[in-house]
Amino acid sequence: MNRYGSSASGRTRSARRSTLVAIAALAAAGAALAGTRLAGSDEPSTRTAGPTRNLAANRFDAGRAFRFLRWQVQLGPRPAGSRASKRLAARLRAELPNGSYQPVPGGLRNVIGTVRGRQPGRVVVVGAHYDTKDLPGFLGANDGASGTAVLLQLARSFRPGDVRPTLVFAFFDGEESPRGTPDAEFELRGLRGSKIASRALRHAEAMILLDFVGDRDLALPRERGSDEQLYASLRAAARRLGTGRYFSGTSELFVLDDHVPFQRAGVPAIDLIDFAFPCFHRPCDNLTAVSERSLDIVGETMIELLRKL
């Protein structure tokens, strides 16, 4: 996944791994989580109300998004360059509007979809990484599959001309660094897909990253390095929908994630990531750790945000 750090005077790259391990140990003491593999179709849901029934809108098919999350987990581990990762990439390209591959060094590939807006000169990027950490048996239901599932369903939710800016849906390969990479080299050897995409999309006016958006106990405060104005727009969208309590406060932590290359290219960016997820890079990051309701909260809020940009 990502490197976490904090800084009193700027971004440092000291790892928060020990903190996450401590949180995970507390969670594990309560219950041992086991992976569950389920089958299901990925056809549009016929639901009349989503799992989050008190929202002011019902435009995001969370059931379909969750079925796609489950399908990803059924593929097993999906580290960058693996057969499972390539199978996932092929499906993403086939199902995205105007889907295409963007080559990434090392034989990797981003997958890009585009929905033209009413003001096509304006571009907003929404992104997620689709690879998983290269650990034996690691399924990445939240760390990888959740952001990917929400992002694909968002792309399905818009038609040309629905919103003002052109929307670019970017699925990044190689966010995780290769196996054996020291923590100090994460930025050098990780974020491989977003480094390429940020160069091609440096003209974008905004970038929103979805990472760790499916865990059951969802909380998405502003990552400390994320653009304040863009996050304020997200919070306003959440308040209109009734999801404001999930998007509040500011973390003291900087997160080194796929939004950072965009920031360094001059694009205002925010990272939607639940810092306190207890199954970070652990076997318990499986279907028992994620929730369709959380996908619905994030998906509906994102639709509201994008419609107002």
Image: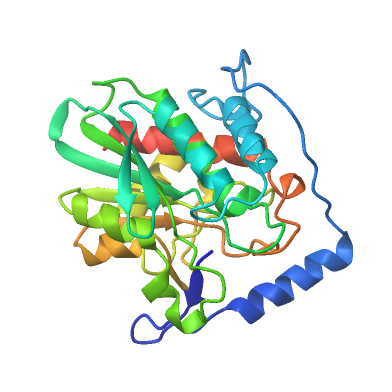
Please give the name of the residue rendered at 60% of the width and 17% of the height, measured from the top-left corner.
45
Placement of 212 over or under 249, stated as above or below: above
Residue 305 located left or right of residue 62: left
Task: Mark yes or no: residue 54 visible.
Answer: no
| The quarter of the displayed image where residue 188 is located | bottom left
Q: Position of residue 79 (x, y in %)?
A: 55, 55
Residue 280 located left or right of residue 104: right
- The colour scheme used to paint the residues is rainbow
Please give the name of the residue rendered at 70% of the width and 55% of the height, measured from the top-left corner.
285
| Figure disc tally | 0
Q: Position of residue 124 (x, y in %)?
A: 26, 42
Q: Position of residue 296 (x, y in %)?
A: 57, 34
| The quarter of the displayed image where residue 194 is located | bottom left
Please give the name of the residue rendered at 65% of the width and 48% of the height, measured from the top-left corner.
141
Task: Mark yes or no: residue 207 visible.
Answer: yes
Please give the name of the residue rendered at 88% of the width and 59% of the height, measured from the top-left corner.
31
Q: Quick one: 89 or 194, which is closer to the camera?
A: 89
Residue 167 located left or right of residue 78: left
Image quadrant in which the N terminus is located:
bottom right
